[in-house]
Amino acid sequence: MIKGIFPTEKFQHIETPFYWYDMDLLRETLNVIRNECGNKPFHVHYAIKANANPVILKEIASYGFGADCVSGNEILRALECGFKPDKIAFAGVGKTDKEIGIGLDHDIFCFNVESIPELEVLNSLAKERNRKARVALRINPNVDAHTHKYITTGLNENKFGINEQDLPAILQIFRNSTHIELIGMHFHIGSQITDLSSFEDLCVKATELQEWFNQQGIMLPVINVGGGLGINYQHPNHCPIADFESYFRLFEKYLKLQDNQTLHFELGRSVVAPCGSLITRVVYVKEGLEKNFLIVDAGMTDLIRPALYQAFHHIENISSDLNYQPYDVVGPICESSDVFGHERLLNTSKRGDLIAIRSAGAYGETMVSQYNCREKPASYFSDHI
Ligand code: LLP
């Protein structure tokens, strides 16, 4: 029996839990992004942190996109999977000397620098290697992304980015340093942003800052607005591809680029979330006093988003066609927060049924832990199954 988009029959003999990726959906998404950006001076650097599975990365790299990395190992992984060094941006508040060295040795496109001490270290490490590091300043724009507080990054209270007040001092450092070159400004206000007006606010702020730089006699060739475009977790079948058209059109409308300026994006979730599902098996159906529990073999170690951010993922039983009834879908981990969903309507389920937890392609596999000595879930791809 094939139910919905899943080859349930083929899943029967695979050990659960596992991640399953719909590669056609990934390719469709990548085509949409490429078409939307194709005729504009827009460059997408895929945020590796969302999903660093080599099969996924190779597919994304084959479309010519760049990479946004937040660790030395992400840079190495991106290079191994075919991303070009001159399209790699390196962000992060705590880049170590070793990691900066990896970036310098591969002469990556740009370091998104987040503080004055980092800028000074970058200059001295580049000097040791006789290199010149290209820098985009990550500026904290103090723009509210209206999303979960753990994934809001662009407010003054957050640890990320440089404050506007520090910019004159930073320009002075550039004037006195020989091995760093200022090429742009960088922002990232948060993730899972569905109210696009937050990006409008960002455009207003970026334009203001752009004018300030121009007044100082500086023209920046690169503006990087980070990532953050949200997806529809509620309706994965009706809205499998994020609204890239409105997203890119917004930036085209509200951020006027100067001559020879390029606009850069670091999209993660919107690229890969919809194509991934966590497939798990019902271990027990437990009848409680007030509710019924589906105890499945995946836990928060395999997908931590519901436990950490109270995130919603659509859940469906892909083995059953019986009437719907409410269940709390929970994992086996010894933590009360190990719950995938409360009071979810699923087809009547029994031990052994397969359950799909949808839209898990981003920040799923990359955030797996081995708490309780658990094994990491395997991954399978629609191309090979
Ligand atoms: N650029 C920077 C500097 C970032 O910090 C992030 C994500 C991105 C780009 C990509 O953002 P996206 O397009 O994926 O929203 N684990 C959380 C999300 C953390 C996002 C961290 N930064 C979750 O599962 O919701």
Image: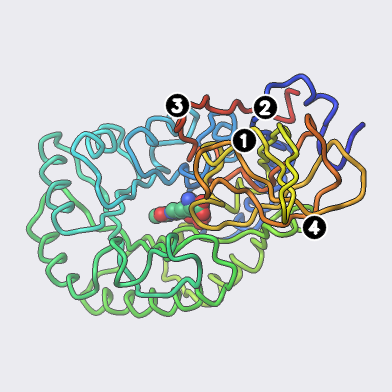
Mark 3 lies on residue: 80
Q: Does the residue labelled 1 lie within 8 Å of ligand 1?
A: no
Q: Mark 1 points at which residue?
A: 298
Q: What residue type is labelled 1?
A: Ala
Confirm if mark 2 falls within 8 A of ligand 1: no
Q: Is mark 3 on a helix, strand or loop?
A: helix
Rendered image: mark on residue 238: 4
Is disc 4 surrounded by few (<14), some (14 to 19) or many (20+) residues within 10 Å?
few
Going from N to C along the chain, the mark reached first, 2 or 3, is: 2
Q: In the figure, 144 relative to 291: above or below?
A: below
The spot of residue 269 in percent (x, y) is 56, 51
Classify residue 174 as left or right of residue 58: left
Q: Are marks 4 and 2 in contact (CB under 8 Å)?
A: no
Q: Marks 2 and 1, Cα distance to the nearest angstrom?
A: 8 Å
Q: Mark 2 points at which residue?
A: 16
Amino acid at the residue labelled 4: His
How far across and how far down the image is residue 125, in percent? Answer: 14, 40
> Is ligand 1 less than 8 Å from the beta carbon at label 4?
no
Q: Which residue is drawn at 51% across and 27% down?
A: 374
Marks 2 and 3: which is nearer the front? 2
Q: How far apart are marks 4 and 2 (CA)?
A: 27 Å
Tag 3 and tag 1, C-beta contact below 8 Å? no
Q: What residue type is disc 2 on?
A: Thr
Badge 2 vs badge 1, beta-carbon distance below 8 Å: yes
Q: Position of residue 184 (x, y in %)?
A: 32, 61
* Left-right relation of 257 to 242: left
Q: Specify whether tag 3 is near ligand 1 (CB below 8 Å).
A: no
